[in-house]
């Protein structure tokens, strides 16, 4: 840890203790999905002095990302999100090692992409089966992993929580992840409808989502006859706002830093 690192991140040391800085500088964190939630995780971890980041995503910046994603600027439209964020990380901390993986994580490449010895893995993708796959593989490898619920359709950042995945309430995305982990990956099932701790922290909102209707209005109820299972995407689906996606990302990053710094305030 050189003098410039100590100067850049002295404020982190005064928050978590000077002994935390070498641990953060030596840490390697993977962020899978660097869009609406994941891009803010990258920003927060870079500004917390994490020494090595692996960014995994294949998406390019789209103009419709402007409402919720850090890399979306007028001049970055059409560029790889991973490339844009990697360049930003090095501007924040020139000593940070950034590994750019311009791929979507799939069943066919998961073992290769999760081959490095990560100190923490952040799941910020929005496909149920892939989220469950990431969690299962991390558990098998012994990697700490944290996952994100859905930020789409939420307006209120003050009701975003962190808890164990088994106690994450009615978030539809995380409910699907729990079901997939139990049915496809051998995780313990709940007994008599009582939640079972899964040893996976997650960030989620307790807010009921707002549904977009075809006439341009919004409602707490889905439109009759409309497609169910809306997702947060570029052209349609749930709406989203930076003050919610950013809060999700910052809470994910806060838990990662807390664990890596071994925070134990007196």
Image (spheres, rainbow, N blue to C red):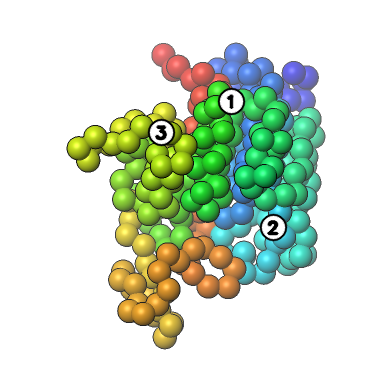
- The image shows residue 217, relative to residue 6, as above or below, that is below
Callout in the foreground (2, 3): 3
Viewer-proximal residue among 35 and 45: 35
Q: Residues within 10 Å of mark 1 (few under 14, many from 20)?
A: some
Residue behind mark 2: 59
The residue shown at (31%, 50%) is 170
Q: Earlier in the sequence, mark 2 or mark 3?
A: 2
Q: Can residue 172 be seen by looking at this rendering?
A: yes
Q: Residue furthest bottom?
A: 215
Is label 1 in a helix, a strand or a loop? helix
Q: Measured from the top left, where is residue 159 in percent x and y?
A: 34, 49
Is 233 on the left-hand or right-hand side of 26? left
Q: Measured from the top left, where is residue 48 in percent x and y?
A: 62, 32
In the picture, residue 25 is in which quadrant? top right
Spatial CA distance of label 1 from label 3 is 15 Å
- The image shows residue 160, relative to residue 201, as above or below, that is below
Callout in the foreground (1, 3): 3
Residue behind mark 3: 187
Residue behind mark 1: 141
In the picture, residue 233 is in which quadrant? bottom right
Q: Measured from the top left, where is residue 99 in percent x and y?
A: 76, 38
The residue shown at (41%, 42%) is 183
Is label 2 in a helix, a strand or a loop? loop
- The image shows residue 155, relative to residue 188, as above or below, that is below
Q: Earlier in the sequence, mark 2 or mark 1?
A: 2
Q: Earlier in the sequence, mark 1 or mark 3?
A: 1
Image quadrant holding the N terminus, namely top right
Spatial CA distance of label 2 from label 1 is 27 Å
- The image shows residue 218, relative to residue 136, as above or below, that is below
In the picture, residue 53 is in which quadrant? top right
């Amino acid at each position: 840890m050189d003098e410039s690192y100590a100067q850049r991140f002295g404020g982190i040391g005064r928050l978590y203790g000077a002994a935390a800085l070498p641990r953060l500088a030596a840490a390697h964190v993977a962020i899978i999905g660097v869009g609406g939630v994941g891009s803010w995780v990258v920003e927060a971890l870079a500004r917390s002095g994490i020494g090595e980041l692996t960014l995994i995503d294949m998406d390019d910046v789209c103009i419709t990302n402007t409402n919720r994603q850090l890399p979306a600027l007028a001049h970055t439209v059409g560029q790889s999100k991973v490339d844009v964020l990697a360049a930003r990380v090095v501007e924040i901390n020139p000593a940070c090692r950034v590994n750019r993986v311009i791929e979507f994580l799939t069943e066919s490449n998961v073992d290769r992409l999760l081959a490095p010895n990560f100190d923490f893995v952040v799941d910020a993708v929005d496909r149920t089966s892939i989220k469950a796959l990431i969690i299962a593989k991390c558990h098998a490898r012994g990697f700490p992993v944290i996952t994100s619920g859905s930020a789409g359709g939420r307006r209120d950042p003050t009701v975003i929580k962190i808890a164990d995945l088994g106690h994450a309430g009615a978030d539809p995305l995380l409910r699907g992840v729990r079901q997939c982990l139990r049915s496809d990956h051998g995780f313990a099932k709940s007994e008599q409808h009582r939640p079972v701790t899964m040893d996976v922290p997650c960030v989620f909102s307790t807010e009921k989502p707002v549904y977009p209707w075809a006439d341009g209005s919004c409602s707490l109820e889905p439109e009759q006859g409309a497609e169910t299972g809306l997702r947060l995407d570029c052209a349609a689906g749930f709406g989203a706002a930076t003050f919610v996606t950013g809060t999700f990302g910052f809470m994910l990053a806060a838990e990662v830093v807390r664990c890596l710094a071994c925070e134990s305030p007196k």
